[in-house]
Amino acid sequence: MIPLAKPHIDKEDIREVVEVLESGALSLGPKIEEFEEKFAKQIGTKYAIAVNSGTSGLHLCIKALNIKEGDEVITTPFSFIASANCILFEKAKPVFVDVDEETFNINPELIEAKITDKTKAILLVHVFGQSCDMNKIVAIAKKHNLKIIEDACESINAVYEQKKVGTFGDAAVFAFYPNKQMTTGEGGMIVTNNKEIADLTKSLRNQGRSNNMQWLTHNLLGYNYRLTDIQAALGISQLNKIDFLISKRQELVNIYLEELKDVPEITLPKIAKQNIHTWFVFPIIVEEKHRDKLIEYLMSKQIQSKAYFSPAIHLQDFYKKEFGYKKGDFPIAEKLSKTILILPLFIGLTKQNILTIKQAIIDYFS
Ligand SMILES: *Cc1c(COP(=O)(O)O)cnc(C)c1O
């Protein structure tokens, strides 16, 4: 079986984790701060705040920006559901804007029509490893006095015009589930240049304790969204080789692009010229009538692939029920959710594997 994704864990990772286990400092120890410092440096922000998942990180950003019931947040329907759910956690309303057909990211040309006097923020998602069109989005946010939260969970190290994603908004979130470019098992990281947001999210992840207060003093309603030092040690070790992890993905993608370019039934992903893509997944587009059958056929040949993201968020059951969304509301996102599949991409995938996948695709279409 060729799996869809697999984390890359080496001896160094294992040694770092075992060292923490032997130290006995399993949580609230020194590894968290070290991971945060290194991560902030990697992205180029003043602060980084480690949390136990990307979803927790997004939730705390919503809280820290004081987004609450009655507020609206502009976001994308073509994403993993957590990027919209975090708005619902605080009873605010996600207002969807359709996406660009080539980058799969929120279409800036459609944002302004959705802004009302209730709009507080734009929560954008850099989908699959590629940045949104940030110049346009930042200009719109400035003009209308809106906050920006970047969901960069799929796009560590991605670049837009020489600047890394995660440095454009008021806050951004990265994630480290095992299928991401780097992993801590479960985990996430908030980054920001804003000290207030940094202090607030740091307090909220730890039961609302202020950073210099005693253990049982809580001045805010907080959560337990802490990452362990075991996970932080793995994070540090993975971050130390992030350039390797991403360049390997790029090498594999280059092989895919070369091998699949002459298969007429496939549309390959496009990269906007101002972007450096970091390939959370490798997506291809096929006709709607073939997509699910191709996935099934590949599975019969021991090759995992997956419809991504399907269905679009506004067509998930409780969004339809709660907000009355229906088919046709966001046609590009819906079309993509019916035509994209992702192919195996992980370190350890071989050129031979890719040739096997290519042959299976060709066999399906013939
Ligand atoms: C992975 C991911 C998240 C966070 O997921 P967790 O499993 O909570 O770490 C959020 N948004 C997007 C777009 C993601 O891909």
Image: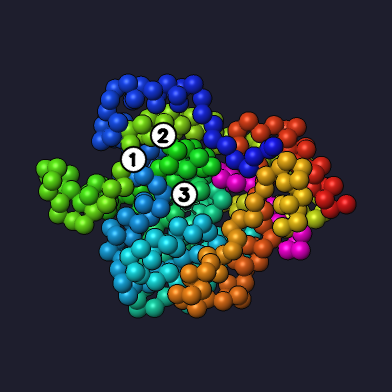
Image coordinates of residue 117 in percent, x first then y, are: 35, 78
- CA–CA distance in space, label 3 to label 2: 14 Å
Specify whether residue 67 is in view: yes
Q: Amino acid at mark 2?
A: Gly
Per the rendered image, the range of residues in magenta is 276-290
Q: Mark 1: give few (<14), some (14-19) or many (20+) Cα within 10 Å.
A: many
- Looking at the image, is mark 1 or mark 3 earlier in the sequence? 3
Query: What's the residue at 36%, 44% (across, down)?
Result: 52
Specify whether residue 143 is in view: no
Disc 2 marks which residue?
235
Disc 3 marks which residue?
153
Question: Residue 176: which quarter of the image?
Answer: top left
Query: What's the residue at 45%, 26% (across, down)?
Result: 13
- CA–CA distance in space, label 1 to label 3: 16 Å
User: Is the Cβ of the residue at disc 1 closer than 8 Å to that at disc 2?
Assistant: yes
Q: Is mark 3 within 8 Å of ligand 1?
A: yes
Where disc 1 sits, the SS reads loop
Image coordinates of residue 98 in percent, x first then y, are: 55, 69
